[in-house]
Amino acid sequence: MSGHGTPIPMTSHRAGPLSGTAEVPGDKSISHRALILGALSVGETVVTGLLEGDDVLDTAKAMRALGAEVTRDAGGTWHVHGVGVGGFAEPEQVIDCGNSGTGVRLIMGAMATSPICATFTGDASLNKRPMARVTDPLALFGAQSVGRAGGRLPMTVVGAAEPVPVRYEVPVPSAQVKSAVLLAGLNAPGETVVIEREATRDHTERMLAGFGAEITTEVTDEGRVITLTGQPELIPQTIVVPRDPSSAAFPVCAAIITPGSDVLVPNIGLNPTRAGLFTTLREMGADLEYENLREEGGEPVADLRARFSPDLRGVEVPPERAASMIDEYPVLSVVAGFATGQTVMRGVRELRVKESDRIAAMAAGLRAGGVTVEDGPDWWIVHGLGHGNVPGGQTCESHLDHRIAMSFMVMGMGTQSPVTVDDASPIATSFPVFEPLMATLGADIRRG
Ligand code: S3P
């Protein structure tokens, strides 16, 4: 889909206390990868707990367009009959990745070393986002691409007929870029090496190993050196998608700022490359506990218990933690407004090229709601007003960005006056049950 249809204005009123259990949906990053790696295996991959948000559904459509059979049974289990590494067919139509940067970048990587041509497009947000960060390394494999000015979608990629393996140091901290190169490396003979200075989410590495690829990660002075041996036969898997810590962030933060709240968010993955927000909240003095900490499928998992936390303190978030909470800064900035003192966030340039410029979008809405925010190219500072003192009463623009919309809905739960977003429809890309789930907890979110 390229657009979100009619805008859905939404207003969050002071409510609470929030209580009960928040069963958040499956992990978006792992859901995309389950479909793509399933499509590159020979045989049937079975996926339960897949996130059925628009982003992932667009990736499912793309896998069908590239020749895989992807179906959902009546029980909600997904079945992917893959075509094998190098087995993608040329799509007959343009591939529309909707709002999803992860979808388009990973799929470009996965097809770039096959002798096929594909044209990609997306919605107004995705078509503004930079793609050269992916097409530059794909060119080293022998793929060609042509798109709009500045490397923007729509864009056509001609896969390399005789790909060569590459050694590539990722210039920005981006799991999407790393993953695109690794997926391209699957169909190149020999060893593809990706080096990342800062650790980003490692789902691609873990899942490639799970599907039977030969892949190693070495931590050296250069950073993390990931080596993949090309042209494996990937073995289909049965995948249980864990719940998304990035979605868990919303009920957790809502409970922390809403008086009297006590919310349980069960089965959340605490992979260290994803859990930076929870560490930061605890440093701020949030009442957030990890209950029933355990290991599932090689990953740490816990039930999160979040309670209202009236005495939050502003903190300085270490820049080296940025990659592990990159999608959570918008909602952290809301919590920071309810803390006393400054919350300083540095080393976050990447926030400016997400579904929206997330620093600009959050700063504008927070300022309109009475919170002072300073910002620069790769930093921002929120001056907290303390619990009970945030005026609110503003209407914010979501800029086609699900996390901006949900962050402002959380803000309205603790402000003196309600908070409105102009368009909450993008929430369907990652958290389609946000509205009913928050209502069950006791939130007062209304359309209009
Ligand atoms: C993702 C990587 C991150 C993140 C996005 C999901 C992934 O993007 O913001 O929501 O699944 O690889 P970048 O790679 O651009 O940092």
Image (cartoon, grey):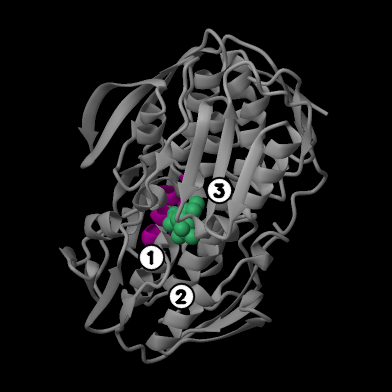
Q: Is residue 286 left or right of residue 131?
A: left
Q: Quadrant of the N terminus?
A: bottom right
State yes or no: discs 1 and 2 in contact (Cβ < 8 Å): no
Q: Is residue 30 above or below residue 77?
A: below
- Residue type at mark 2? Met
| Mark closest to the chain's N terminus, 2 or 3 | 2
Residue 438 has which mark? none
How crowded pointer 2 is (Cα within 10 Å; few <14, some 14-19, many 20+) is rated as many
Q: Is residue 390 left or right of residue 87?
A: right
Up-down: is 37 above or below 156? above
Identify the mark at residue 380; answer none if there is no mark. Answer: 3
Dominant secondary structure (helix, strand or loop) of the stretch shown in magenta: helix
Residue 73 seen: no
Nearest the eye: 220 or 445:
220
Residue picked out by circle 1: 179
Q: Nearer the viewer, residue 294 or 314?
A: 314
Quarter of the image for residue 82 reads bottom left
Label 3 crowd (10 A; few <14 / some 14-19 / many >=20)? many
Rounded to the nearest angstrom, the CA distance separating label 1 from label 2 is 12 Å
Read off the magenta span. Answer: 28-38
Q: Secondary structure at mark 1?
A: helix
Q: Is residue 118 magenta?
A: no
